[in-house]
Amino acid sequence: MIIGIDTSCYTTSLAIINDDGLIHKDLRLVLEVKPGEKGLRQSEAIFQHISNLPRLFEGFQERVKISAVAASCFPRPVDGSYLPVFKVGAAFGESIAKLFGVPFFPTSHQEGHIRAGLYEQQQPEVPFLAWHISGGTTELLLVTPGKGGYRIEKIGGTSDLQVGQFVDRVGVALGAPFPAGPYLEKLATGSKDIKKLLPVVTNELTLSFSGPESAAQRLVGKIPDQDLARQVINCIWKSLFEVTALAVKRFGINKVLLVGGVASNQLIRQALLESGNRNQIDFLFANPKLSSDNAVGVGLIGSDLYHYHLLK
């Protein structure tokens, strides 16, 4: 069995991957954010991770033979990528590996998202495009598969506000709890209004949500909440599609994976799939449960690396 650990900004995650590369356990605890707050300080998140990890292991009471441990030790696989929260999972994972005398495989949160996104897909052997869209990240990536991980080049993304921040700020203004994604999605399903009230701001492979967010805040209380929620979602998928279409043309790659919490939104998924079908763009999505922060992808990367080294 391979243990995967991920301690992101808002979720403590533990995964167990069996010897066949299948998910044996997927355990998570979402960090608590006080009502009305729009996020957590790193120190608060670290304190909750330290408390949560023993609770997750307590919930897993089977005896298993541990072959290796993997943890997301940094946000992205680039020099200088750092967030304090990931040090908790990294230290915990490395300590377990040393205790049991098994290999420890460090990886990144972003690679974990991509690997989880491909869990139910055939693993590509050629470069593909990927969007990592969440509360803290809005990046368009050129991804080249490797042995137990990926070579990732950022080719586009937001110039200001992250897509998840756009959702959360408008959602909280409408009375949603944080994070606001599920609330806003449910609200938007009740809208029949298709008028375009929010701008779509893109420039080459860059998109912006600060202007749309300001415009949305001005509409709070002036139009029905469900219509404003739908306007936010429409602005997001249209912005993503405009930039994606240009990247597909520029790089000659039509396979596009979407990962991250925002990628679990069913309205965004459906709109992108329909637009992709009309424009010969192959959008791929993870199972919604594997779109949000989890340790499954981290554990799968650990499994890939373990079996790769075993066969060398």
Image: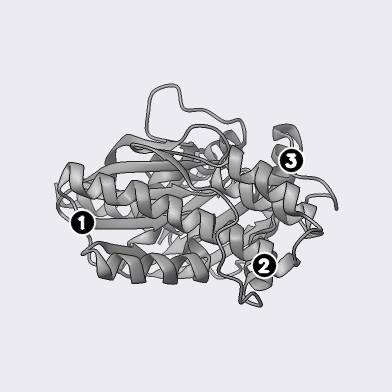
- Compared across the picture, whether 88 is left or right of 152 comes to right
The secondary element bearing badge 1 is classed as: loop
Q: Position of residue 93 (x, y in %)?
A: 52, 43
Q: Position of residue 151 (x, y in %)?
A: 26, 38
Instruction: Tell whether label 3 touches label 1 (CB within 8 Å).
Output: no
Q: Report the amino acid beneath label 3.
A: Leu
The residue under label 3 is 40
Front residue of 205 and 135: 205
Up-down relation of residue 103 to residue 245 (above or below): above
Distance of mark 3 from mark 2, alpha carbons?
A: 29 Å
Q: Position of residue 24 (x, y in %)?
A: 45, 70
Q: Report the amino acid beneath label 1.
A: Asn
Sequence-wise, the earlier of marks 3 and 2 is 3
Identify the image quadrant of residue 194: bottom right
- Compared across the picture, whether 126 is left or right of 47 comes to left
> Residue at coordinates 66% horizontally, 46% vertically from top-left?
215
Q: Residues within 10 Å of mark 1 (few under 14, many from 20)?
A: some
Kindly give the residue lying farthest to the right in the view shown.
Answer: 35
Sequence-wise, the earlier of marks 1 and 3 is 3
The secondary element bearing badge 3 is classed as: loop
> Residue at coordinates 70% horizontally, 43% vertically from top-left?
50
Up-down relation of residue 141 to residue 281 (above or below): above
The residue under label 1 is 254
Distance of mark 1 from mark 3, alpha carbons?
A: 37 Å
Q: Nearer the viewer, mark 1 or mark 3?
A: 1
The residue under label 2 is 227
- Compared across the picture, whether 47 is left or right of 296 comes to right
Distance of mark 1 from mark 2, alpha carbons?
A: 32 Å
Asked whether residue 148 appears in the rendered view, the answer is no
